[in-house]
Image (spheres, rainbow, N blue to C red):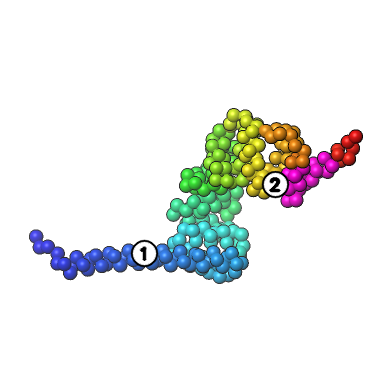
Amino acid sequence: MKRPSLFAVFLVCSVFTAGICHAQAHVAAAHDLLQIGIAAYNQKDYATAFQKISEAADQGDSRAQSWLGVMYQIVQGVPRNLDEAVTWYRKSADQGDADGQVRLAIMYSSGRGIPRNDDEAVVWYRKSADQGNAAAQFDLGMMYVNGRGVPFDAHEAATWYRKAADQGFDQAEFNLGIMYGTGRGVPKDANEAAMLIRQAAEQHLPVAQYTLARLYRGGLGVPQDFHEAAEWYRKAAAQGMVAAQNELNAMSGADRNAP
């Protein structure tokens, strides 16, 4: 059998290598466009952001596709178009992008831009959650708590909340803390509840600040401390939480009426 010439081998290898180089250059170009777009977005230059992110998305960059969906959804640089948002989220999600997947799941679970479908929402939440996306892990936990798209399962909800909480997701920390406080889906543990709620409160989640204040006021999972209670009520009230301000007023009134 006649062996291929060295020239033929070189030609094939050159064509193959050129194809790889072209693909790599294409990816790099899309990545660079996305970075320029994100920088413009952060500077509130939404017109430039939309242009550059659109170009990257058209080249198939999954992150850019998710970003473009966001811009269509929240009206920045382009008129609001939820149908377009869903289209771009789906393109991103189909490529395995965790952000695109969780955003598509949110659209399914809320019925925005697409008919509400809890089963589909769970599918996409799970795909994203399995990649470690904390928001998806939290939302999947919420689906289990509410029995949407899956049977109600408090233990499974707590499992997903824990995954998100371990990444510092404040709402997951708070919800898991409440579950430990009530013994729902996990063994009841006032100390664990207070610790998790504090973590969320320290991230400025108003409802966590308010709840931590109540724990201090009642001595639940923490030593009773009215000064600490007032401090956390004050922080929650400063973020517009009316119930926290009412509790502060009540504490002040009690102090004035004390013998």
Per the image, the residue denoted by label 2 is 206
Q: Residue at x 64, y 48 (%)?
A: 203
Provide the secondary structure element on which disc 1 rests.
Answer: helix
Main SS, magenta residues: helix
- Magenta stretch: residue 231 in it? yes
Q: Which residues are magenta?
A: 230-252
Residue 217 in the image: state x and y as whole percent.
75, 36
* On-image quarter of the C terminus: top right
Q: Quadrant of residue 254?
A: top right
Provide the secondary structure element on which disc 2 rests.
Answer: helix
Q: Quadrant of residue 84?
A: bottom right
In the image, residue 42 sits, relative to residue 89, either above or below, namely: below
Per the image, the residue denoted by label 1 is 23
Q: Residue at x 65, y 46 (%)?
A: 202
Q: What amino acid does circle 1 point to? A: Ala
Residue 130 in the image: state x and y as whole percent.
47, 44
Drawn side of residue 178 relative to residue 5, left or right: right
* On-image quarter of the N terminus: bottom left
Q: Earlier in the sequence, mark 1 or mark 2?
A: 1
Q: What amino acid does circle 2 point to? A: Pro
Front-lying residue, 144 or 170: 170
